Image (tube, rainbow, N blue to C red):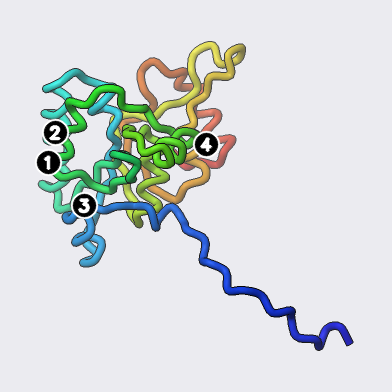
Amino acid sequence: PLLSEPPPATSPEKTPMSLSDLVHPSPEVAAALRDARPLVALESTIITHGMPYPQNLETALRVEAEVRAHGAVPATMAVIGGRLHAGLTEAELRSLARATKVAKLSRADLAACMATGGTGATTVAATMIAARAAGISVFATGGIGGVHRGAETSFDISADLTELSRTAVTVVAAGAKAIIDVPNTLEVLETMGVTV
């Protein structure tokens, strides 16, 4: 019978590569992962798109110091030269703070930036993806994106909301950014089953 016949001989297939295979942890993050110490993921768009130099660097260093002061290891996420970094050294932070032509990365942009060897700063959505790939379950940020005012005609809704519904990372934030339509953002989060 057909069911008892052995399967045809095939050549051994390579194991498909996952995003976690492409994550490059900083030495500090690698040690924390190895020792099972608490880690907190941080986004990098505040460094490249949110503030001018040197305030951007000062803020990044202060946020990382605050995470350390509470017993966790900070893991600022960014793509540098096509490599997805989970945690940046101080030299990498300083370089990113002065960099120009840095892409702003969300889910749709992350793979393209990596494939082309680009440099990009992670938004909330991309940071969640990177954190999950790195094995980090907590992410702290100032504010998430959401439903933009006038979205009923523009359909301008942040990818952050979709990512919150699909990626298993706890996001600690002050809420939606001030320019966002907060009631409609909460409505979309409820529709997507995101606990707030």
Q: Which residue is mark 2?
A: 94
The answer for how far apart the CA atoms under marks 1 and 2 are is: 6 Å
Q: Which residue is mark 1?
A: 90
Percent coordinates x, y for residue 160 in the rendering: 45, 33
The answer for how far apart the CA atoms under marks 4 and 1 are is: 32 Å
What residue appears at the point 15 percent right and 45 percent down from the top-left corner?
89
Percent coordinates x, y for residue 90 in the rendering: 12, 41
Of residues 20 and 192, the one nearer the viewer is 20
The answer for how far apart the CA atoms under marks 1 and 3 are is: 10 Å
Quick one: SS at disc 2? helix
Quadrant of the image containing the C terminus: top left
Q: Which mark is residue 162?
A: 4
Quick one: SS at disc 1? helix
Count of numbered circles in the view: 4
Query: Mark 2 is on which residue type?
Result: Arg
Mark 1 or mark 3: name the one nearer the start of the chain: 3
Quick one: SS at disc 4? helix
